[in-house]
Amino acid sequence: MARPIATTLPLPFAIEPPVTATFEHSRPAACPACVALPDAAAIAPAPKDARLMLSLPTIHCGACISAVESGLNAHPGVREARVNLTLKRAMIDAAPDVTAEELIHVLESAGFEAHELDASQLAATEADRTARDLLMRLAVAGFAAMNVMLLSVAVWSGADGVTRDLMHWISAAIVLPAIVFTGKPFYTNAWTALRAGRLNMDVPITLAILLAVGTSLYETMHSGHHAYFDAAITLTFFLLAGRYLDYRTRAAARSAAQELTAMEVPRALKIVEGEPVQTNVSDLAAGDLVLVKPGARLPVDGIVTKGHSELDRSLMTGESLPAFVQPGTLVSAGEINLTGPLTVEVLAAGQDTALHRIADLVAVAESGRNNYTSLADQAAKLYAPGVHILSALAAIGWWLYTQDLRISLNIAAAVLIITCPCALGLAVPAVTTAASGRLFRKGMLIKDATAMERLAEVDTVVFDKTGTLTLGSPEPLGLDTLTGDEAQVALALADASSHPLAEAIADALTDQDVIPAELDEVEERPGYGISAIWKGQRVRLGRAAWVGTVAPDTTATFLQIGKGTPRAIRFSDHLRPGAAEAVAGLKARGLRVLLLSGDTKAAVAEFAARIGIDTAEAEVLPDQKAERVLDLARQGARVLMVGDGLNDTAALTAAHVSISPASALDAARVASDMVLLGKDLSPIADVFSTAQQARARIRENFTLATAYNVIAVPFAIAGLATPLVAALAMSFSSITVSLNAMRIR
Amino acid sequence: MNVLVILIPVSLFLGAVGLAGFFWLLKRGQFDDPEGDANRILSSDFDDKPKG
């Protein structure tokens, strides 16, 4: 979409831990991907092996892989290029003088969209190792569990005496080292929790494992009948599976979100001795002069010293009308320069910009949010103490009854194993993995683990207008009222400019098969319009004031032929595909839908009527947006905020749950819980049903796990739980829970 | 029952070989790009030696 992002905003809160997903498909968003990056690649840091990384959002098949790889390998200086289709990225090992920019050119001429990624942020990282580490532990646990089960089957089917002891000893020999290695994530978590004086799920898990292994070892030494080695290791296996799924879902979402951020490299063109030089935004200081090319985003707050142009302020304020700027106009970071080159004197950079003040608003809103308790936490809070009390009571009861510590400890271990939290450990991750997989295919990326649960509770939806419900790209109205000549002249003039309004006119007229008139002396005056000579008369297309008329309150441009009265060509914002369906779908679900926009009253009222939203507020300032969202929350509403602009970030953070389109500013994407990957807005209505299903499945899973416990715990307390019963209960509950999660659609 | 003396070590050994193989493949990055690998086998440019 038409939001070129050239330099990025120095946002202090836009930093997430860098994560690379190894086993998940992470499709870069359709939109930031199609964004132009004119200057970003010029200063590639030059380590010895320029290890470059490119994002290739459009590759999808084996033929693309070979085309990209052979294209890159043929480029001089490239030592090796390797495409990763799962992550849609290319990793390039090249000589230090090869820049990402030239490789992007190579790929673009081969027909592939490519963008530079910040390799230092995305390279194999800490988190990547964590995923591998979990997978390795999972593999060891699986190996040990299978072998021990094999031996246990012999015991269950009646092995006796020496044979049984032998089986137990071999099981012990496998399980002891395996459980020390595989259970480490649980032990460390449990230890951290205990040291902080809290209980979490890992405490009963660790206790169950230790007690089961301890008593089993004791039993084995004394030729006892029952050893729970198989149960202990299977428990670890199921729990690790849950942990790994959980981790993978989060890592995939974070990696994709990271990828979006990494795409925008913060650089600016500083003017040094009359020449523009690429500089990092963080190195700019007040008083520096910065050149901002058309299509680029302003990196700093400042004052225009040279040049005329128009600025797109919609991401900052929500205004859809481009603002005219000339020397002396104050501009702020985040606005996009549309027509002519501007020289801007820096007044404030980095932390001092208006942009950063909005970031402060977000920080304030964020502090109010972190009190959401997920279903998993609620369950853990009930479960952990309950299990401890239960097994302690069983142990005490048996000790009083038999005065035999060995029996009572055995019973305690059996109770801990039977109440095995593995179904609980799988209950949530299995569902979130299945649901986020489904949502990813629908084009929605879940960034936050609890976002789905929160979404299921939403009863009010607040939309932003510009850039969210609309594409932020104008659509000319009433072109068919132009006469044939006017249309031809308008097309010829519009063709000469890259201004968004001119481009919209040119596209629309070309679609109507208008043939451009022949013009002479075509000249564009940045910030004003285009003029030319047609059949001896001066023709102009441009701003109201320039052609000598009064500007209306909606977006419009004017066509003047000779000395005639200027004809207004009005524009309306292009509706985002699926926006009307999304709004209708949400209303059909009985949700309250509101529109909060920073745009003018006339534009907002007309738009709200067109899309069918009854409650609309116009000219809302960024902090008022957040305030309105908090107001709604105080009245008891659970608000979903959908927005894309900087003026929405505070509201996105303040809302119960938030969604931003991929075209949104990185700040907005970071502030929101979900990112919409495609242009289409219609998945939003679907997401609700998936989220509600996910919540229902999680609840069912908890019920299932509890039901198993209710049936099995009496057996364990009564001392009837043999290792076979434990193994059956554990496997059945884990498998039912996983199968139930798969039912999500 | 004497056969157990052979069978148990054999089963453990075979399992361990599988596990070691999995570790080796994981370290070599064989599971980094499942989708790409699925497509690469259809590619007509034949690699006569594996890439590093």
Image: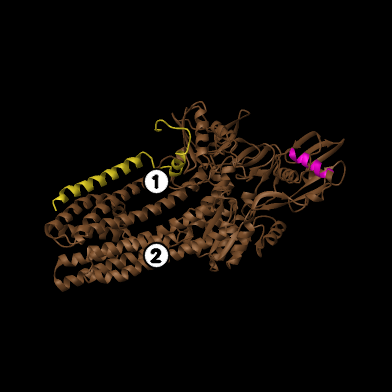
Chain colours: A brown, B yellow
Q: Is residue A588 visible?
A: yes
Percent x, y of residue B18 = 29, 44
Q: Is residue A264 left or right of residue B11?
A: right
Instruction: Name the residue at 47% across, 54% down.
Output: A437
Q: Identify residue type, mark 1.
A: Ala
Instruction: Name the residue at 44% across, 48% down.
Output: A24
Q: Quadrant of residue B25?
A: top left
For the magenta stretch, what is the residue range? A485-495
Q: Chain of mark 2?
A: A
Q: Identify residue type, mark 2.
A: Asn
Instruction: Name the residue at 33% across, 56% down.
Output: A239
CA separation in Å, label 2 and label 1? 29 Å
Q: Earlier in the sequence, mark 2 or mark 1?
A: 1
Nearest the camera: A191 or A724?
Answer: A724
Q: Is residue B21 left or right of residue A288?
A: left
Nearest the camera: A301 or A557?
Answer: A557
Point out which mark residue A701 bears.
2
Percent x, y of residue A298 = 61, 41
Percent x, y of residue A35 = 59, 42
Instruction: Name the residue at 21% across, 67% down.
Output: A411
Q: Is residue A596 visible?
A: no
Residue at numbered disc 1: A127
